[in-house]
Each structure stands twice: as structure tokens, then as C-alpha cells.
Image: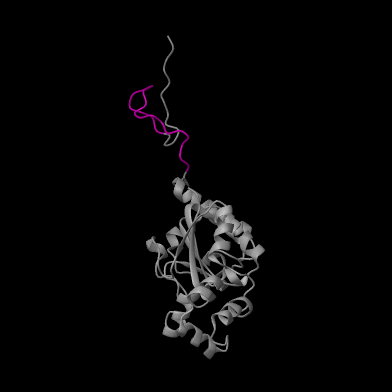
Amino acid sequence: MSTLMPFRNPVSGTQPLVAGLPTKKPEWPPRSANWVPFRLERMHANRDMLKKESPQHGCPEQNQETSKVFPLTYSQSTRCLGRRMHFGCGENRLEGWENWDLPQVDIRRRLPFGDGVSAVIFLEHVIEHVTPQEGYRFFEDCLRVLEPGGVLRLAFPDPVRILRGATPGYLSWQRVKGWGDGTAASGVRAALFLHGHQNVCTAETLTCQLESLGFKVTEHRPRESNRDTMRNLECHGYRDPAQWESTLCQTTCLEAVKPS
């Protein structure tokens, strides 16, 4: 008759009290000393991918010089999952967001982030400063960077809105600034030729592009949204009543949701 050999736990190396009868089922595969939950494992993988793809971009500890110039205000514990990204921020730093601008992030180039790491992306009066081809490629890259159900919000000057909804206050403000002669036509011309604009953005043209990529698009007024995280974001001229009236007259906001 064969003798049962004592069972040895592959993790702890300890023997059970009764030979041949383990006190509990061993875990397989055994956890190593550096085992981490899947969520943290994914976060570390995304961070490593970020370092590999673009060492000069990324989290503060990767580039101390960059973080001094463009401090990030998002939670350190969630920087690689469900991230809120604000591109072309300028001086408008949103609390709780990653606020990126040139030269750290250039939307004309491939975004230096991993796949599916962002919950929301926001641009205010930025997309009109790149060519239509560059803008479309950026939308393709947003589709990659956003997580399923993630949202891209765009705020941009819309010539159609200017022509149909210009108020006397807006036209007067344009004339004072030297950007027009006080007519809606001159406001449209300013949106096309001034301020470094390279793209004619309207609700119809951008909706067409975004929906062709699979996004579900809705239109909103500045600082308004059905989502809490997307409200009160636009600040283009918000502190100047005359300029804010201009922003309301000319700005269209679109929210594009990535399919789940």
C-alpha cells in the first residue's frame, strides 16, 4: 500500500495539519510577491506605453521640467484610467483635468497616450486652428484614446451661427476690435480669415466627420451639457460681458460619444 506524501502549499510552502489533505485549495497560478489587482496592472501598462511612445510627454515624474511649466491638476491615483484631457488650454486651466498645450501635446500629431485611457476630451476654440485634414486625423486619434462611451467636446466659432444669430452687441464689439465693419458678413469673414484660423468649422461639417467615424453627436450651447463633467467648461471671454456675448453668438459646442 502506497503512502500519501504530505501536501505542500505552493505559495506559502507550509504543510497542512493532516498529511495528504490540504487545509484549503491552493491558488493557481500562485500570486507573486509583486502581484497587483488587474485595474492597477492596466494602469501601469498604460503608463509604460506612454513612456515608450513619447518619453518627452506624460506624467510629471517622467518630465520634471515640463510639469513645472504645465502643472497637471488631476488625481495622481487615476491619471491613467478615466482621464479628463483638455487640449490647447492656454491660460484656462480646468481643475481636475490634464491641461495640455504646445509644445507638450500637438493635436496635429499622434496623441502621446495609450488606447482607451481617457473618459473625456475637451477643446475650446482650438480645432479651427488646424487644417480639415489634420482635424479629421485628430478625431480618428480621439476615437483611439477615448474609452468606450468616452466623450469628445468641441467648442468652435461657427460662421453659420454668426450669420444667422449675430446680435447688435456682437457686431459692435467686432467693429471696436477692428475685425469688421459692424455687419454679419464681416463677422463671417473674420471667422474665416483672422485669428490664425485654418479651418471652416460648422455644426454640419464636423458632425458629418465625427459621425462617419462612428461617434454619436449632440449639439449644445456654451457651458451647457447633459453631463455634469461637461458643464461650465467654456471660458473664452467669460469674464468680459462684451466678449462673452460674442462667444455666445459665434460658438457651437458638439459632444461626440464613442460607441460602447
Percent of width and height locating residue 190: 59, 80
From this view, report whether residue 208 is shown above or below residue 247: above
- Residue located at (48% from left, 35% from top): 29
The residue lying toward the viewer, choosing from 10 and 84, is 84
- Dividing the picture into quarters, in which one does residue 224 lie? bottom left
Q: Is residue 135 left or right of residue 15?
A: right
Percent of width and height locating residue 105: 59, 67
Residue 54 visible to the viewer: no
Percent of width and height locating residue 122: 50, 65
From this view, report whether residue 38 is shown above or below residue 18: below
Percent of width and height locating residue 227: 39, 60
User: Does the magenta segment cover residue 17?
Assistant: yes
The residue lying toward the viewer, choosing from 163 and 107, is 163
The residue lying toward the viewer, choosing from 188 and 248, is 188
Residue 212 visible to the viewer: yes
From this view, report whether residue 92 is shown above or below residue 3: below
- Residue located at (41% from left, 25% from top): 7
- What range is drawn magenta here? 14-32
- Dividing the picture into quarters, in which one does residue 110 lie? bottom right
